[in-house]
Image (cartoon, coloured by chain):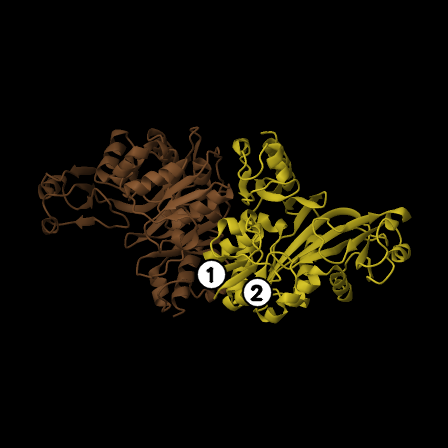
Chain colours: A yellow, B brown
Amino acid sequence: MTVGILGGGQLGLMLAESLRKLDTPVLVLEPDDEAPCAQRLAGIIPAAFDDAAALKDFFARCTRVTYDSENIPSAPLAPFADKLAPSLRVLQVSQHRAAEKTFLATHGFGPVQFSVVKATDSLHDAVRRFGTPCIVKSSLGGYDGKGQHKVKHDADVRALPDTGSEWVLEDVLTLESEVSCIVGRDDGGRAFTFPVFENVHTHHILDVTVLPARIDPSLQNEARERALAIAKALDVVGLLTVEFFVGTGRDGARKLFVNELAPRVHTSGHVTRQACTMSQFDILARITSGVPITAPELHPGGWCMGNLLGDVWLAQGRTGGALDLSSWEHFPQVVDVYLYGKREARTKRKMGHFVVHAETPNEAVDVAKRFREALMSRG
Amino acid sequence: MTVGILGGGQLGLMLAESLRKLDTPVLVLEPDDEAPCAQRLAGIIPAAFDDAAALKDFFARCTRVTYDSENIPSAPLAPFADKLAPSLRVLQVSQHRAAEKTFLATHGFGPVQFSVVKATDSLHDAVRRFGTPCIVKSSLGGYDGKGQHKVKHDADVRALPDTGSEWVLEDVLTLESEVSCIVGRDDGGRAFTFPVFENVHTHHILDVTVLPARIDPSLQNEARERALAIAKALDVVGLLTVEFFVGTGRDGARKLFVNELAPRVHTSGHVTRQACTMSQFDILARITSGVPITAPELHPGGWCMGNLLGDVWLAQGRTGGALDLSSWEHFPQVVDVYLYGKREARTKRKMGHFVVHAETPNEAVDVAKRFREALMSRG
């Protein structure tokens, strides 16, 4: 029994730590020798995700293989699909925006109103038909806001190439909040969700995750039920993170919309390491090790996970490595700081995170903001 | 900044994981190439604890050095005492039973009634003077009940050599329970205790740790205050685990007695990884990394940590490695299983542990016992 992880970032590292608790041998395939796993784990295979020979060797040595990102080429994985969890189909659906939206709409899972624009179609005409304002998203490879354009006027759309790329057009919601829900589902079909997380983004990058989410309990239940139904429809074995918008669309109805799917451990799920009795990493470790799963519970109080981007290092005059954490003394509600060991600090690069436990979600968010400010003022 | 750990067992491994979260580089000195750290971490120095050249190199590369056991020779560490945390004196006091008892008695910290027998003294005469029943403990090197003899009759003492070893004689208490309290203390003198843990031993080896401890709150407060006072008197920088007996001695008074000191992360503290907002490993990582500490809090409910000895593997017909965990499905209250990756299962060898979260401490203990029985019946 050996579990393989395609991708050795911080998510892969935390998954590897959970796998080792079960004494499941772990192999990680990761091309970047500065990635968190490469810095901290023995037994990394340093190869590209489309290196056919390396993949053949890697899969031969693994009982089951999962991935810490959906931005890996799926075609080279086809010969090894029987060992992939979640499956190749789940990976393909979630990494291709048009396929994802079409799947969601076809099954009645309520995506934001959208239209697919093929590479041979005229994007300009399509936007005029769809109507502005809208968001133009590339069908492949976008994350953290990359490959997205908000189009308000005709001039905005004329700045984009008319043909040659596949796009998805999306309605612009009057957005109230964003939430995510992680489903765990094992190969015996046992499934549950973690509690619903509220996510606040800044410049399209996750800034803080808040728990419990500050939205109606009925909407939270709806999110959990819909996430479970999506995981079942896709026959997910592993984790499926479903990202939702709460907002009002063109038809004027306030609703829960599915934004996108990530069939893997998720940045918003870092908070589960402290806030829940079992973490997302522990649950995926059980699933991939063939150990049947049970549902985690949420500890009382308010929780907030704050991302630490490279900007914090730069504010401290550091180029990477450790941080000056001396101000932690004044924040007893900060219960964890996890730095990923990335050597080079760059603006907007995810370099670490921390978790706050307070009486209420609002208080937790407030402490998180003040803690980050205190870190950034240690320059 | 690099933190060294003398000893690469499971306690050292979990400490290393906490240190890496702060991006503090870790070096481990461990002679056994099958120890948990050697199996799972890069950068192990495979040398004996009294290898002067290896120690010199090791300390030269470390900013600060701690240890995961007090059963390491202290004399070879003397040249490097300025980097040791807790200090050489704390290590020496805690590894030498006569020195430990004498320290506790001198400072009024309430050890069990005892008498020191020097190597040149007659043990037989000393026992007769002290009176039976009593417990005869070797002054050096005992743990998990090794080097201990219960003496009821004159014939029992005559079976032991009369001179040549240093011993400590101890009163036999009418024992109600055993508890432990872990103090964290940083180099700024900030100090707190974890909640008091109740420990149940079987054949002198920790069987389960229960939280909250099922003893009067007033005794728990007394244990916390006494543990803090001991840590302050010893000027501990790091962790100090104080083990207590609750019972009645020769004078008929029901009291809290200090049994022994362990200046390190402790097996009873495994439960802090789930039951508290910060673990003992996280706190020692902060102290040794020079990050000021704050106090952890206890999550509500009842908690129980159960040790997994080699006997569980042997009952499953396994010689080591992973366990069959399929029965976990029926125990949703089991929130963590941590196997240490030891290759060879031996009876009474600590190979892993698990943690239960339930409504009450009694329920947690009950679930722990049933879970372990279920594991052992998967032969």
Residue beneath disc 1: A25
Rendered position, A213 above or below A260:
above
Q: Is residue B324 left or right of residue A55?
A: left
Query: Percent x, y for residue A139?
Result: 76, 58
Residue type highlighted by circle 2: Leu
Residue type highlighted by circle 1: Pro
How busy is the neighbourhood of tag 1: few (under 14 within 10 Å), some, or many (20 plus)? many
Q: Is residue A341 left or right of residue B85?
A: right
Q: Identify the mark at residue B298; answer none if there is no mark.
A: none
Q: Chain of mark 1?
A: A
* Residue occupying the point 36% across, 48% down: B199
* Residue occupying the point 10% across, 48% down: B161
Residue beneath disc 2: A55
Query: Percent x, y for residue B67?
Result: 35, 42
Q: In the image shown, does A102 or B225 lie closer to the viewer?
A: A102
Write down the quadrant of residue B232 in the picture: top left
Tags 2 and 1 touching, CB below 8 Å: no
Residue at mark 2 shares a chain with residue at mark 1? yes
Q: Secondary structure at mark 2?
A: helix
How busy is the neighbourhood of tag 2: few (under 14 within 10 Å), some, or many (20 plus)? many
Query: Percent x, y for residue A10?
Result: 57, 50
Q: Chain of mark 2?
A: A
Residue B254 can be seen, yes or no: no
- Label 2 to label 1: alpha-carbon separation: 17 Å
Query: Percent x, y for residue A172?
Result: 82, 50
Rendered position, A361 above or below B369:
above
Q: Is residue B266 left or right of residue B1?
A: left
Quarter that holds the C terminus of chain B: bottom left
